[in-house]
Image (cartoon, grey):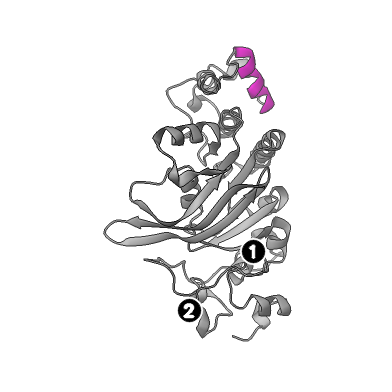
């Protein structure tokens, strides 16, 4: 059963010029599973996450497509229904842990309000228990503190507690460890996934950390220029990627480099689209593109829904650099 279904979603930002941010996204996330969205900055990850909560800015215009979360038509919700959807079905964990908390309110009070809003026990003992579940020592000392009085790692644990105490159906985590040092990143991710699995919550994780994605996520979707260019099991997509962009992205992972080896990079820059791409948006940066790539808009293929007209050739060759362009 799918927790999230996105069909041909296209979105423009309209201003002095029109910029196409999502160019026909197709994506499904299974109930209770975890999926990571990966890709360069500007690929559309954060825009897609914002639309799932109907939190896109006023300049955004939905061109076409649909979104269902837990069977709810998200784009068709009225004001009251949208408020219930955000409260009951959805939770966010932001990149900036301290900035995501109310700076004027003590941590204990923030937990109390969230628990009360969902009709749960909001007693001091329950709030203490939530912090203990996040492995926060001395919770009685933390409850009366303001967000600026705790470390980034502790603030992110509090943010996870606030998100998960509502028992959401879908958790969207937007680079939740990017602002943390390496010593606490793994522990914060472990706590986030443990809470989600205990509650059966589906996770959508936006990340640039490919090794962490491979360790923690069931599935991964690779985004480029507002489309999902490849989707599959995380160990498969990151271990043996099929789409040329997925392969290029995986090659930039520092953990794959041998000592003394130069870090790989992807030449050029992502395109700025002003409407639907006529062909493959990656064609100008792709090492194996042919003339047809620039004019043929690729559709999801049978192998990991790869958006590449040469997928069969690449799979057979096992190495895209060996395929004649």
Q: Is residue 104 above or below residue 319?
A: above
Q: Which residues are magenta?
A: 124-134
Q: Is residue 248 above or below residue 219?
A: below
Furthest residue to the bottom?
324
User: Based on the displayed image, in which of its 4 quarters is residue 300 positioned?
Assistant: bottom right
Contact check, label 2 and label 1, Cβ < 8 Å? no
Question: On residue 294, which mark appears?
Answer: 2
Other residues around mark 1 within 10 Å, as few (<14) / some (14–19) / many (≥20):
many
Q: Is residue 187 above or below residue 292?
A: above
Is residue 126 on the magenta stretch? yes
- Kind of element beneath mark 2: helix
Task: Indicate the position of residue 296 as horizontal and vertical percent values.
Answer: 50, 78
Secondary structure mainly formed by the magenta segment: helix
Question: On residue 48, which mark appears?
Answer: none
User: Based on the displayed image, in which of its 4 quarters is residue 211 positioned?
Assistant: bottom right
Q: Nearer the viewer, residue 258 or 307?
A: 307
Furthest residue to the left?
16
Q: Is residue 176 visible?
A: no
Q: Nearer the viewer, residue 272 or 155?
A: 272
Q: Nearer the viewer, mark 2 or mark 1?
A: 2
Q: Is residue 269 above or below residue 84?
A: below
Which residue corresponds to mark 1?
250
Residue at 60% x, 13% y: name it: 124
Task: Indicate the position of residue 14 as horizontal and vertical percent values.
Answer: 32, 56
Sequence order check, earlier mark of 2 and 1? 1
Q: Nearer the viewer, residue 304 or 207?
A: 304
Is residue 175 on the magenta stretch? no
- Kind of element beneath mark 1: helix
Task: Indicate the position of residue 151 as horizontal and vertical percent values.
Answer: 56, 30
Task: Indicate the position of residue 157 as horizontal and vertical percent values.
Answer: 60, 31
Residue at 50% x, 26% y: name it: 147
Separation of residues labelled 2 and 1 (CA atoms):
23 Å
């Amino acid at each position: 059963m799918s927790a999230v279904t996105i069909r041909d979603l296209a979105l423009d930002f309209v201003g002095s010029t029109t910029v196409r941010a999502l160019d026909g996204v197709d994506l499904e996330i299974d109930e209770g599973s975890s999926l990571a969205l990966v890709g360069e900055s500007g690929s559309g990850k954060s825009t897609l996450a914002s639309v799932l909560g109907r939190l896109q800015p006023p300049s955004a215009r939905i061109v076409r497509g649909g979104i269902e979360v837990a069977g709810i038509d998200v784009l068709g919700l009225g004001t009251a229904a949208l408020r219930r959807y955000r409260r009951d079905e959805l939770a966010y964990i932001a990149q900036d842990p301290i900035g995501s908390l109310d700076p004027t309110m003590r941590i204990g009070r923030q937990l109390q309000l969230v628990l009360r809003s969902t009709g749960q026990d909001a007693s001091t003992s329950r709030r203490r228990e939530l912090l203990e579940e996040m492995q926060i020592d001395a919770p009685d000392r933390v409850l009366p503190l303001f967000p600026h009085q705790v470390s980034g790692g502790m603030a992110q644990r509090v943010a996870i507690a606030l998100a998960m105490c509502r028992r959401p159906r879908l958790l969207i985590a937007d680079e939740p460890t990017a602002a943390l040092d390496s010593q606490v990143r793994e522990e914060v991710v472990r706590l986030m996934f443990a809470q989600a699995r205990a509650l059966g919550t589906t996770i959508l994780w936006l990340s640039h950390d490919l090794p962490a994605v491979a360790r923690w996520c069931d599935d991964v979707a690779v985004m480029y220029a507002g489309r999902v260019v490849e989707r599959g099991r995380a160990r498969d997509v990151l271990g043996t990627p099929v789409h040329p962009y997925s392969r290029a992205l995986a090659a930039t992972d520092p953990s794959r480099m041998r000592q003394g080896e130069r870090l790989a990079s992807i030449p050029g820059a992502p395109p700025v689209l002003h409407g639907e791409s006529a062909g493959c948006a990656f064609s100008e940066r792709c090492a194996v593109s042919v003339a047809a790539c620039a004019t043929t808009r690729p559709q999801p293929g049978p192998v990991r829904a790869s958006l590449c007209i040469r997928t069969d050739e690449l799979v057979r060759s096992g190495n895209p650099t060996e395929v004649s362009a």
